């Protein structure tokens, strides 16, 4: 079986540092670097328990907490890369903690269960129904 780091450029596989925003983009957590920068500046990414800046350099072994939509990922940096590679190779850049994996799976199951209990209307409101809804909303004001 091939070495997992074989696809990484030698300079980045040797232990050099990489900008946080570039690494998040290369690891495919965000579709563009600009989205990665916005997430970092918005406090959605923590490096070793601290808020970070997009230009912060990270190395192998760094712990990241990434909040994306409703999911929180806790990952440990396993390899560095500044180039966006296929998803199969991007997964080799990090290792998700078992606690994070279990929590994400439990949250996904809970959301699926909640969705199944939601009452969806069988059809669109008729003209009469819309009038009743409008009157009801007006009475609340």
Image (cartoon, helix red, strand yellow):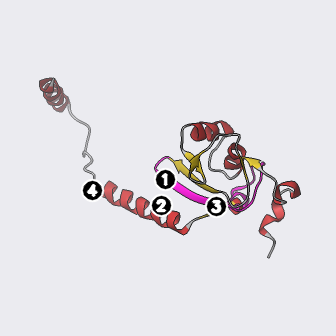
Q: Quadrant location of the N terminus?
A: bottom right
- Read off the magenta span: 69-91
Q: Mark 4 = which residue?
A: 117
From the viewer's perspective, is the residue at label 3 or at label 1 nearer?
3
Cα–Cα gap, marks 2 and 3: 16 Å
- Residue 31 lies left or right of residue 130; in this view the side is right
Above or below 128: residue 47? below
Magenta stretch: includes residue 123: no
Q: Regarding mark 3 in the picture, which secondary structure is present there?
A: strand
Q: Which residue is mark 2?
A: 104
Q: Which secondary structure lies at badge 4? A: helix
Say whether residue 90 is magenta: yes
Residue highlighted by disc 3? 76
Mark closest to the chain's N terminus, 4 or 2: 2
Q: Position of 72 compared to 30: left or right?
A: left
The residues tagged by marks 4 and 2 sit, at their Cα atoms, a distance apart of: 20 Å
Sequence-wise first label, 4 or 3? 3
**Image side of residue 94 versus residue 115, left or right:** right
Picture quadrant where residue 33 is located: top right
Residue at mark 4 to residue at mark 3: CA–CA distance: 36 Å
Question: Cα distance, mark 3 to mark 1?
Answer: 16 Å
Q: Residue furthest left?
A: 139
Residue 104 on image: x %, y %: 47, 60
Residue depth check, mark 2 versus mark 3: number of the one nearer the observer? 3
Q: Residue at x 15, y 23 (%)?
A: 141
Q: Secondary structure at mark 2?
A: helix
The residue drawn where x is 13% and y is 25% is 135
Q: Quadrant of residue 4?
A: bottom right
Q: Nearer the viewer, residue 139 or 122?
A: 139
Q: Where is residue 111, by image quadrant?
A: bottom left
The residue where tag 1 is placed is 71
In the displayed structure, 29 sits above or below 55; it is: below
């Amino acid at each position: 079986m091939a070495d997992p780091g074989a696809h990484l450029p030698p300079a980045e596989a040797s232990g050099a540092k990489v900008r946080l925003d570039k690494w998040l983009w290369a690891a495919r957590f965000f579709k563009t670097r600009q989205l990665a920068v916005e997430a970092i500046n918005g406090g959605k990414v923590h490096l070793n328990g601290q808020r970070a800046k997009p230009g912060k350099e990270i190395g192998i072994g760094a712990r990241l907490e990434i909040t994306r939509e409703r999911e929180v990922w806790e990952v440990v940096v396993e390899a560095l890369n500044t180039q966006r590679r296929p998803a199969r190779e991007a997964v080799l850049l990090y290792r998700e903690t078992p606690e994070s994996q279990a929590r994400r799976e439990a949250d996904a199951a809970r959301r699926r269960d909640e969705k199944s209990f939601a009452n969806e209307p069988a059809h669109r409101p008729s003209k009469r129904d819309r009038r009743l809804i409008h009157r009801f909303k007006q009475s609340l004001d």
